[in-house]
Amino acid sequence: MFKGSITAIVTPFKDSKIDEKALRDLIEFQIKNGTQGIVPCGTTGESATLSYEEHKKVISITVETVNKRIPVIAGSGSNNTEEAIELTKYAKSAGADGALLITPYYNKPTQQGLFKHFEKVAGAVDIPIVLYNVPSRTSVNLLPATVEKLSKISNIVAVKEATGDLKQCSEIINLCGDRIVLLSGDDFTVLPLLSIGAKGVISVVSNVAPNDMFLLISEFNKGNIAKACEIHYRIFNLTSMLFIETNPVPVKTALAMMGKIKEDVRLPLCGMLEENKNKLKEVLLKMKLI
């Protein structure tokens, strides 16, 4: 259901408010350049600093603008299970095609707690669910055995894996088979994960270079491994620069340099160090993105 190059889209702000026009324009830019899915209100969308009303507004704008041309997977996770259910219910009512649910952060639940959390959300809302495992952000690791148990729940259809651990990802595919789709959650690992059976990526880099990420996956799927490898290395320095500081600060800075949004993030995030901004600009110039 969910595969290929899927963009975890930024939430553009103007004077600290959602810039609706810029968001709609970004979505059109994504679709025009081959993107095969949009994730609003993920980490890259600064979901942690959006109010409930803003969160819902971003999902609604995205669903309306996409207009069923590609899937919309709405970020609706929380470290509060009832809150995750509320946001996921809204995503379904707004017309999203799926929901992305991060592992509960800060609470540090056990594997049984993680299972019960996702089981309850999946049982409460009949919508395709993508699990999101990113221990560097949450301090908990959704282990392969737990993913296997969750894959037996019919509407849990995919997992976004951002551990960078090829062994763990291989174990998930080995245990779950076709019951669940594995998606890269880390732009550095797209090519190696495709080689072991992943079906795509939920990407930060594709905000800036959507066609490159689309082509990387397309060429791999056509069997043009050398071409896919060439694209991997073409965007390698860009990927490094987009994570030189905390995501989504660099990617929003890059999009601002491209003239697509204002360079505006919400505290406690703040603007890039000048020396890092200059390094990012050099890479964008070299790639002819600005």
Image: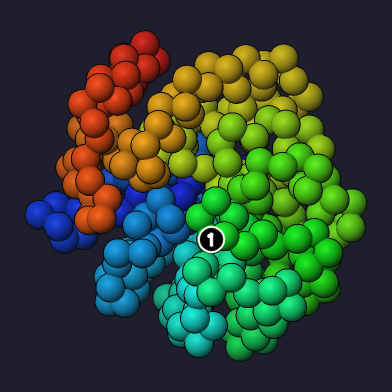
Q: Residue at x 41, y 27 (%)?
A: 241
- Mark 1 is on which residue type? Thr
Q: Residue at x 14, y 52 (%)?
A: 14
Can you give x and y, in whole percent of width and height, for residue 202 in the image? Answer: 55, 47
Residue, disc 1: 138
Can you give x and y, in whole percent of width and height, for residue 184 in the image? Answer: 64, 44
Residue 178 quadrant: bottom right
The quarter in which the C terminus is drawn is top left
Q: Residue at x 66, y 41 (%)?
A: 164
Can you give x and y, in whole percent of width and height, for residue 278 in the image? Answer: 25, 20
Front-most of residues 276 and 39: 276
Front-most of residues 284 and 267: 267
Q: Is residue 48 above or below residue 288?
A: below
Decide if residue 207 is in sight here.
yes
Front-most of residues 80 and 224: 80
Question: Left or right of 150: which side holds 73?
Answer: left
Can you give x and y, in whole percent of width and height, for residue 93 in the image? Answer: 46, 81
Residue 194 quadrant: top right
